Image (cartoon, helix red, strand yellow):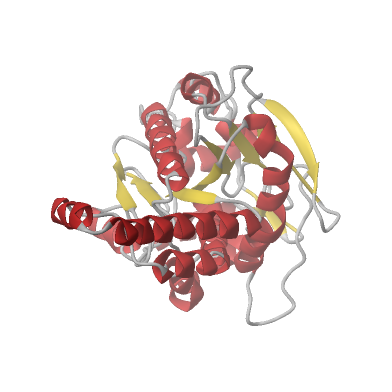
Amino acid sequence: MDPFSLQLPSGGTVTGLRTPALSSGSPKDTPLIIGIHGGGYSSAYYHTTPTNSAAPYSTFLRVPFLAIDRPAYKGSTALKMPSSEDSTYLQEEGKHLHYEILPAIWAAYSKEYGVSSIVVMAHSLSVPMTVVTAALHAESASNANTVKTSVPSTRMTAEQVDDFQNQPKEAQQHVVDDEQLNTQKLASTRQQQPYPLAGIVLSGLGTSLRHDTMQSMQPFLTHHGDRMTFPAELKDNVMLCGRFSGLVEPEIFEMTEKLNTDVGIAELVDSGDEFWQIWCKRYMESVRCPVLYNLASEEKLWTATAETVTAFAGLFKQSVRVDSGIVLGAPHSMELSRAGRGWYARVFGWAVECGIAHGLGKF
């Protein structure tokens, strides 16, 4: 992947890594997958080794991939803390992604890649901002949803087809005209949106925090100002289940120091249990695009059971499609694990399905 730096409308900057555009182009209705890392990592999380990287899947399926550095990570401009008690850091980060980052990326690279939509792939602490973004996008797309339901659907059953064929030509034309008007209005509304969102992929964050892990980490964290650093050995044990777990190739542990970055204290505070109880559920219930949600079976930060995964997925009450499960044999940072190859393959395949469904106007 190649590094990029993009100027935002507000004057800030977002940096990251991206795959080059393919000379052969991408198939019709291909999405651009945008990876967003969690706390203590950077865009390099999605391009660590030739095996643990989104790049080979991007090339094989001809689906471009771009990974950003979240605000205050690497070269991306930091966010100001919210001045209102009605908002939190992660909410503001989600608004920043929706109003600034994704529109800028879409304007800069969509034509170059030849893509028709965006699928966001979020891990750990980037899950909340992605949920906020998807909810805000659903709100901005409410006019499109109104348009879709303002004209009766003309997708007919076999019996309705028979009735349709027995109607006078004038009545048949009226049904065809309604369908065409519906399609045209939906397309017009989509063009007015800052970017087309076809789905979100979420992992590494749940509804039941492992307080035992969090408490055991506290004595080893190094604080400096409004940020802190995870010691390498601690990070290896919590994020990767340690060198002797068999879940991660040895070469990944040699890269811990290189991959390690500071994490903002505000985002850690905001991601605890209170985060879900106060406001995140409200955003989740507003999301309408497809959702793919998985937790790692060897997760040390969140309780990963069939019950907790089902509970999390069930909060997306308006999403047109919700797929959820547990990735067996994977630690918290599962993109860095041996099971990461299967996870990447699933994400890319799922994103292709969502891109096509979006292009066909299924949602």
Seen in the picture, residue 282 relative to 343 is either above or below; the reply is: below
**Which sits in the foreground, 144 or 105?**
144
Q: Residue furthest bottom?
A: 85
**Which sits in the foreground, 108 or 92?**
108
Residue 178 placement, left or right of 64: left
**Total marks in image:** 0
Where does the C terminus fall, quadrant-wise?
Answer: bottom left
Residue visible at 27% across and 59% down in the picture = 310
Q: In the image, residue 139 lies at what x, y percent?
A: 54, 69
Where does the N terminus fall, quadrant-wise?
Answer: top right
Residue 248 placement, left or right of 160: right
Seen in the picture, residue 258 relative to 194 is either above or below; the reply is: above
Q: Is residue 223 visible?
A: no
Q: In the image, residue 39 lies at what x, y percent?
A: 59, 50
User: Which picture quadrant has residue 360?
Assistant: top left
Residue 208 placement, left or right of 2: left
Q: In the image, residue 41 lies at what x, y percent?
A: 61, 42
Q: In the image, residue 243 lies at what x, y percent?
A: 44, 29
Q: Is residue 269 visible?
A: yes
Residue visible at 31% across and 49% down in the picture = 323
Q: Residue furthest left?
A: 159
**Which sits in the foreground, 227 or 4?**
4
Residue visible at 86% across and 55% down in the picture = 11
